[in-house]
Each structure stands twice: as structure tokens, then as C-alpha cells.
Image (spheres, grey):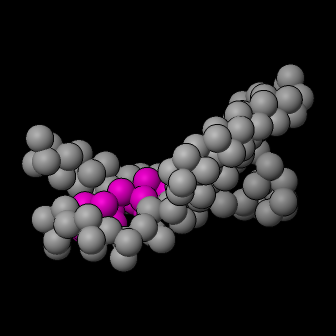
Amino acid sequence: MSGLLEAGNGSWSILSAYCVLFTLMYLVESRPRGRMTWWAWSQTIGVELAIVTAGICLAVVIARSPVWLWRFETGGDMAQLSRYLPMVGMGSLVGCVFFLWYLRIITRWVGLWPVVLALGSVLLYLATFIPRALG
């Protein structure tokens, strides 16, 4: 089972890194030319979704790669896990920010309440989970 987890984390990290690379290439290629300003270009739905996609994929790389590296280097030694947790936490935080941004983009027509509801649900979850995990 551990080998499947290794394969899954490694595969997700590799594919996500390619997604970041090619999404950035798309953004460079589609940069504004002529009369369109950088600000107007950055506000188009295609560009916003590309930026969010790159951010989410970057978060996957940041969060999954350390887990793969921890298992590869230590064989899954729990005593060594704390060395890798800051990157996993940072990847999770980056992912949450970009997922909320994605939700904002696709629900713009109904207002801000979907983002507020999603963020409130996460905060409620963390408020109940963290005390149990630490205590």
C-alpha cells in the first residue's frame, strides 16, 4: 500500500509541475499585444483561470513533494516527519487561497457568499479539529 501512495504523490507532483510550466507558457504567449493594457488582460476570465490553475497546481507540488521525499528519504519514519511539515502546511495554505480565488471567479455572478460560506466552513472545521489534534 505504501508503494501506491509513493506512486500517487510522485505522479501528482510531476503532473502538477508540468501544469504549472505549461500554464505559465500559456500566460506568456497570451500576454497583451497592441492596445490592451496589462490590467485589462489580467482581468479576462481565461487569464484569471490560467493563473488560478497554475496556483492550485503549484500548491499540489509544494504539498505533495515533501510527503514523497519524506517517504523516500526516511521510509516513512514518523520521527522525521516534522522536518517536512512546514512545506506541506505552506502548500495547503497556498492551495486554499487559490481554490477560494477559483470559487470567486466561477461564482462572481451570484456574489461573494459562496466564498464566504466555503471559508467559514473551513474555519469552523479548523476550529474544531485543531484543538482535538493538539490535545
The one nearer the camera, 70 or 102, is 70
Measuring from the top left, give residue 21's x and y in whole percent.
Answer: 43, 61
Q: Residue at x 27, y 73 (%)?
A: 80
Measuring from the top left, give residue 125's x and y in whole percent.
Answer: 64, 38
> What's drawn in magenta, residue-wise?
58-71
Magenta segment: does it hold 62? yes
Residue 77 is left or right of residue 83, and the answer is left
Q: Is residue 15 above or below residue 71?
A: above
Q: Quadrant of the N terminus?
A: top left
Q: Is residue 93 above or below residue 77?
A: above
Residue 95 is left or right of residue 13, and the answer is right
Is residue 94 visible in the rendered image? The answer is: yes
The one nearer the camera, 29 or 6, is 6
Q: Is residue 43 above or below residue 90?
A: above
Q: Residue at x 59, y 58 (%)?
A: 94
Numbered label tally:
0
Q: Residue at x 53, y 57 (%)?
A: 134
Identify the image quadrant of residue 126.
top right
Residue 9 is left or right of residue 97, and the answer is left
Q: Residue at x 42, y 67 (%)?
A: 85
Residue 82 is left or right of residue 129, and the answer is left
Measuring from the top left, give residue 77's x and y in whole percent.
Answer: 20, 66
Hey, which residue is sitting farthest bottom in the picture?
A: 83
- Assign the magenta stretch its main secondary structure: helix
Q: Quadrant of the C terminus?
A: bottom right
Magenta segment: does it hold 34? no
